[in-house]
Amino acid sequence: MQQDSSSLQQSAGGASAADARSRLAADYGRVRALSEQLCEPLAVEDYVLQTAVETSPPRWHIAHVSWFFETFLLRPFLPGYRVFHPRFEYLFNSYYEQTETGFWPRPERGLLSRPTVAEVYDYRRHVDAGMARLLADCADEHWPMVAERLAIGINHEQQHQELLVTDIKHNLAYNPLKPAYREDLPQAPAGDPDAAAYLHFDGGRDEIGADLAAGFAYDNETPRHPVLLRPYRLADRLVTNAEYLEFINDGGYRNPALWLADGWAAVQANGWRAPLYWEPADRAREGDLGSADAWRQMTLGGLRALSPAEPVCHVSYFEAEAFARWAGKRLPTEAEWEAAAAGAPVTGNCVDQGRLHPMPAPARTAGGGLRQLFGDCWEWTSSAYLAYPGYRPPAGALGEYNGKFMCGQMVMRGGSCATSQDHTRASYRNFFYPHERWQFKGIRLAEDQQ
Amino acid sequence: MQQDSSSLQQSAGGASAADARSRLAADYGRVRALSEQLCEPLAVEDYVLQTAVETSPPRWHIAHVSWFFETFLLRPFLPGYRVFHPRFEYLFNSYYEQTETGFWPRPERGLLSRPTVAEVYDYRRHVDAGMARLLADCADEHWPMVAERLAIGINHEQQHQELLVTDIKHNLAYNPLKPAYREDLPQAPAGDPDAAAYLHFDGGRDEIGADLAAGFAYDNETPRHPVLLRPYRLADRLVTNAEYLEFINDGGYRNPALWLADGWAAVQANGWRAPLYWEPADRAREGDLGSADAWRQMTLGGLRALSPAEPVCHVSYFEAEAFARWAGKRLPTEAEWEAAAAGAPVTGNCVDQGRLHPMPAPARTAGGGLRQLFGDCWEWTSSAYLAYPGYRPPAGALGEYNGKFMCGQMVMRGGSCATSQDHTRASYRNFFYPHERWQFKGIRLAEDQQ
Amino acid sequence: MQQDSSSLQQSAGGASAADARSRLAADYGRVRALSEQLCEPLAVEDYVLQTAVETSPPRWHIAHVSWFFETFLLRPFLPGYRVFHPRFEYLFNSYYEQTETGFWPRPERGLLSRPTVAEVYDYRRHVDAGMARLLADCADEHWPMVAERLAIGINHEQQHQELLVTDIKHNLAYNPLKPAYREDLPQAPAGDPDAAAYLHFDGGRDEIGADLAAGFAYDNETPRHPVLLRPYRLADRLVTNAEYLEFINDGGYRNPALWLADGWAAVQANGWRAPLYWEPADRAREGDLGSADAWRQMTLGGLRALSPAEPVCHVSYFEAEAFARWAGKRLPTEAEWEAAAAGAPVTGNCVDQGRLHPMPAPARTAGGGLRQLFGDCWEWTSSAYLAYPGYRPPAGALGEYNGKFMCGQMVMRGGSCATSQDHTRASYRNFFYPHERWQFKGIRLAEDQQ
Amino acid sequence: MQQDSSSLQQSAGGASAADARSRLAADYGRVRALSEQLCEPLAVEDYVLQTAVETSPPRWHIAHVSWFFETFLLRPFLPGYRVFHPRFEYLFNSYYEQTETGFWPRPERGLLSRPTVAEVYDYRRHVDAGMARLLADCADEHWPMVAERLAIGINHEQQHQELLVTDIKHNLAYNPLKPAYREDLPQAPAGDPDAAAYLHFDGGRDEIGADLAAGFAYDNETPRHPVLLRPYRLADRLVTNAEYLEFINDGGYRNPALWLADGWAAVQANGWRAPLYWEPADRAREGDLGSADAWRQMTLGGLRALSPAEPVCHVSYFEAEAFARWAGKRLPTEAEWEAAAAGAPVTGNCVDQGRLHPMPAPARTAGGGLRQLFGDCWEWTSSAYLAYPGYRPPAGALGEYNGKFMCGQMVMRGGSCATSQDHTRASYRNFFYPHERWQFKGIRLAEDQQ
């Protein structure tokens, strides 16, 4: 992917209307193609499964993103559009209460064998054909609304591409045969990363939130607003598996003093003793789990040795927070993270690189700076996902996109190896419940500047 | 199927050893073929689903029945047999605790996409090839044990064919699109059945249980033993949908006085107000449900009008028992049923007829006699599933086949439209928990002779 | 208690009407007094607790038995009777669906602090006063119905006395302070019992069920009817703690081959590794549990050493059945038990003896015979609790007393150390779910006569 | 209570050491006495109950607050102190993982009848005697630590007094007899409050958090730190029952567009259709619930008519948030609330007034200002309960007091009719899960200044 061909990280400001339209059309095509590419390694059977209540079957994702375009663009704006199937609205709406038909219960998405995968791809073709007509013929008076929704729809599909990857990983990891998604995924280079350095930030009065003039952003990144920050320091790379193993070996999962009350309850209820997808290597199953080679890690490339240098991944907020306490540090707030990331180039080990696994931190460069900011793993912050001052959700069903989840979840920043590079940015707010682990989620430490 | 070509309803007694061997080989081939025939209408996606904890994915059935032959015949008796895949024993063992590897948890059979359907059919081929070698080459000294286990394996696969059909039905019924398994299934002929007649039986001292000289039977049908019966009367046909609708209309599901305590609890916990697979026809969804045309019934042929003349089906023991109380009757005991069925021809609307749905009772013949004894619907009895006096399970893992379920379940008799005709008989004891409804289960009424 | 003063084990046949009336009045007074005696050791706080869904708070029992007399005798038969409190019917009805008001949910009986204990005793006084008037003034035309219900009410209160004792035990055992109900309960004498002998019974055609001419019996013991029994043998005493400990030490709780499928599931779900109320003695908590002194047992006299000679108690059907399989024996059927017990004197370690704990078997007498038949522990049979042939429940709400539980439960025989001696008999059928352990439940082994 | 006799709202700064000691001693005595006063109306039975997992039995509170003094003051600081009972530490520790013994599971606090209430009061006496000795004899070198912990212990008991009141209310409301805690509680005066006015606040740079020089505060109120606020407006009184009824009548509980996703899930899972403790008045049970007289409200004075003028109370965060959205407003942030409350007199309808129920807003005064800031109902804010910048919990088990709950809960401000007046202040941060309703929780609306 070439960044300069994308509308997603650019302002629409300077472009002519025709340019904007053709760029959106190109983005649409490119993003839609990626969804199908990501599914290429799947067997038909793989499309059907839902192995956790928070995941969805791949087929559902493939259909749902099409439903989004059908519902918010084709039905309202394409004259004469024929709905593909009258029940698909019910089956493939995710959670929009303000559409008319309700939706099939989320925990039961894996209990449906029809429509078949082939039928769902037919649905995709049908929607793509409609979208081609809409992009070609959309009346100028509708274009602003269409363009706005189209940008949301494209970004929405990118979000589901990430979920597609992580849900496939969950499904395959659940299987005792531990099948690989792709046998040919590259391995991490050997070698240890240098020690983390802590970079100083002055804090003071700063600004966070999306600058809408600078390109697409979700409603929850707005309004841009001032914040006050105390001086702080951020680790210049993510916590590694080797470091996390020290926490485990020091009894991290057995010491309640390290944990939030809800976190300790989760440790006990779920029997956590390592990140998700770590499992004892066979020969050590009953014995010592203190070294990296006592563990294997399920990856999209199959079950692999645990690489000490890679960032620890698939940890819950509770684990990230306990690890930070154990390390004598803390997690950054989202404002600290964003202020530190402002101006950094948005590049990294994203889905575009095709690795689909976090990589060890690159060597520190002469200029210094934060490493692994974008890509690799989403980074837990200590900020609850709440409305920014003055935030207002859009009217109608699209107002449900982000606003109604502003309770009980924590903000994550930076994107992962399953995120499209042009889908992340310094102001991007991802959010998850503190117990959730199935996304690529890692840890960057922070501390107060004394 | 021609009865005289089958070993399953005949004594092995008079036949030569070679005959017996070739007849078992033929049965093996015929029964194995039927499993695949029954799967022909399925899409790949249909093989993966498990929509209730007591059902299994079709793919699992297809693999499990092969695992049975591999485990109990090929591994112990075929020299040089190569196990197809080392983990399949773990994945496709159902519940045999005395095999070495344990088994994948039953409620999670639908959470696996691999092995693929194609791989499972490869497994089948591999086992079939092994079985062909075993049947050809089995040493005479092993033959008696092989023959005994082969008969069990063939019967076992027939049992799973019935589950295959009922589990497919459950999966498709769960889907709001209500897809048909086969569009071409025949409809019931129109018309009402004649009223049920109650046939008198003298009772007294009788005998029940399998006569092992007469052909294959499961261990749980033995030993044959004497029983004492009071004079009783049995309805000469099954209860119909029309009759059951009267029970509903009379407030059957709202009147606790009609129900066993556990039954009333089940009604309330599950919100039952009709048999499984009945649903209000659209136009009546909010209104009166008192007539047959207010309801539709999901069948393997899709969603159909409720036929008043068909036997009511997919009722729990609790519903059968409550209906009987409401009707001023009772359910038969298994001894009453078997004594009455002794000598009756084992024919009926079985899976061999390919209807896959219970049919209205045939017209009463001049000779009278009980109608619908075999096929159509399994018939609830008031007998708990317990050991017959003197019963002993076989040694080893095969002893788990029937014996360990002798608690908490009720006996059903007669077979259904999903049972192979040569798989049922007067002494056959099927057993289910009293709340289960997904099999083809119906009601025959009984009463004391006053 | 003197047996000859009791109506409960005698036929009402030969007595004059006045005699019968005065005997019932005396029984009423005696049984009511025992309920209060059994509560004497309680603190007010002890009356409120419900520590398992199948138990009830002592206060609830005390009120419920009064509600029974109020509902079935005073309201219909005592002219001018004033109901004590309009909401008590709702609060203290147990499960009678056919009364008008419904009932407070059973699992929440321990969530009520009012009415207070004192108010409940006022309610008792009020009902007793009403009953005195009814017994004095009841018109002759009503007497037969009153007498019949009065007998049921007295027996009903005796049943609740047993529950009172076992529920108090459960409540106190739940408390980590392990408070004794009574500090002064006698200990078992030291010494080992002689080995169990197996007594032969011919079987053949026999009769079981209550002979109504012989005295009070519940509906579920009727009708008396013939049975066929194969020759069998019964152990002449109950299984001891020492014997059960061998089963534990032999890995009984870890070997699925010994268990019914539902039993093995219960072992795993509940973490069973010993009978209810056994707990490791402190010094052995982490070590070897293979000897009797490694265990303590909670009793109504507090936490005590485990006596090897006492009958094992507080085992589920699953445990009894697994133990029998391990021992190469089986459990008796209820018909075998009753046929063997017919004619035996109904005496034993019952609540009347005030021990409230099972005792080691008495020494074998010259005449032989079954020991510990009545009292000590209820004995699990292998019979499901079902209707006898020709059974009909009484009309109305009292028909719910026994009939609606005839599904999913197993029959127990003989009575326990918490049963009134005049409340048990050879034909008495107690019934519990196979997982329940909180009653005094033990094991008598049986085997086929070879 | 006279404010000037209390150490709790004053700085310890100017006082002499002796004064401070005697004032703390007086506070100790006064606060301990109030706990017992609050229990005076209870029957012994009332002390035992736990009717929700988040509540505790009154007896448990009475013991736990004593355990706190025993554990954190008497054991470490009183030479020769004899622990009252060796198991009480286990029974009455609430959640401190860093003490040695663990604790009895919270959801099972209502399953214990011993120690009796009388024994728990003995325990209190024993602790009080110890505390008297400690206060008299404490060495000067220990005094600063003792004084600090004593202040925490006194405040801790005040917190439990509030829980005592709300847990008693929950227990009594659960009972279908609806018993009053006190029959003599005053009723609200009749009449409607004036309409709410919205008061303007400039925002800008402000400071929040406790000024430790000004008196006791919890660790979670520190450090005091600057915040940036946009201009905002706050309603000058709480939302009334009449206003909330409009929300209900407008279909508030049926319209998902008004709710957070988790809130809508809670509405459906719990069947919410009104605040906790509202119930239909009998005559309206099946009919229209649109007017205040169609509802009754359980109060500590028993079941009463719903007063339209009283503040709506016992609402969850979800309900408060949905109401605000419906009203076109929002909830205040905790910083907005605290900035607005700074300097306001800390007086109101607190537990000191003995009303134990929120009261209608007093008439607006000439000077204006926010009404009902303190007392009446805790006010939901839109702020998640998180650490203030630079927050550090104390070392050791007391560090668990507040810090480990900083996840998943929302901040409430202002105190309620069950809070001691000298236990609340502008900086006080109370916190609850968003679904919890059993505290006195109400709603103050806010909006952006346009």
Image (spheres, coloured by chain):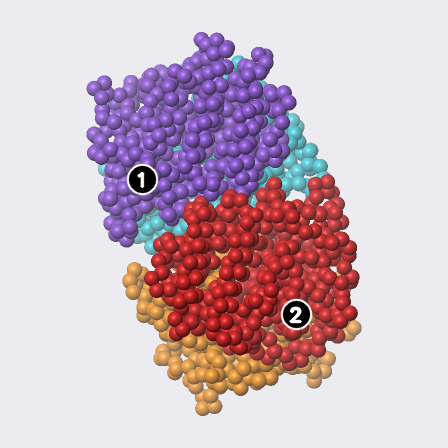
Chain colours: A red, B purple, C cyan, D orange
- Could one spot residue B417 in this view of the protein? yes
Q: In front here: B48 or C403?
A: B48
- Counting from the top left corner in percent of width and height, residue A13 is at 52, 77
Chain identity of mark 2: A
Residue D152, quarter of the rendered image:
bottom right
Pointer 1 residue: B258
Q: Residue at x 43, y 31 (%)?
A: B37
Marks 1 and 2 belong to one chain: no
Q: Is C320 drawn above or below residue A193 in the view shown?
A: above
- Counting from the top left corner in percent of width and height, residue D448 is at 48, 80
Q: In front here: C387 or A197?
A: A197
Disc 1 crowd rating (10 Å Cα; few below 14, some 14-19, many 20+) is: many
Q: Secondary structure at mark 1?
A: helix
Q: Residue at x 30, y 52 (%)?
A: C82
Tell me the CA gap for discs 1 and 2: 74 Å
Residues at badges 1 and 2 in contact (C-beta under 8 Å)? no
Pointer 2 residue: A345
Which amino acid does the dot numbered 1 rest on?
A: Leu
Chain identity of mark 1: B
Q: Secondary structure at mark 2?
A: loop
Q: Is B380 drawn above or below residue D214 in the view shown?
A: above
Image side of residue B180 versus residue D211, left or right: left
Which amino acid does the dot numbered 2 rest on?
A: Pro
Q: In front here: D17 or A396?
A: A396
- Counting from the top left corner in percent of width and height, residue A27 is at 52, 64
Residue B398, quarter of the rendered image:
top right
* Tag count: 2
Query: Mark 1 against mark 2, which lies toward the viewer?
Result: 2
Q: Residue at x 43, y 66 (%)?
A: A135
Q: In front here: B206 or D49?
A: B206
Q: Residue at x 28, y 48 (%)?
A: B281
Q: Is D299 drawn above or below residue D309 in the view shown?
A: above
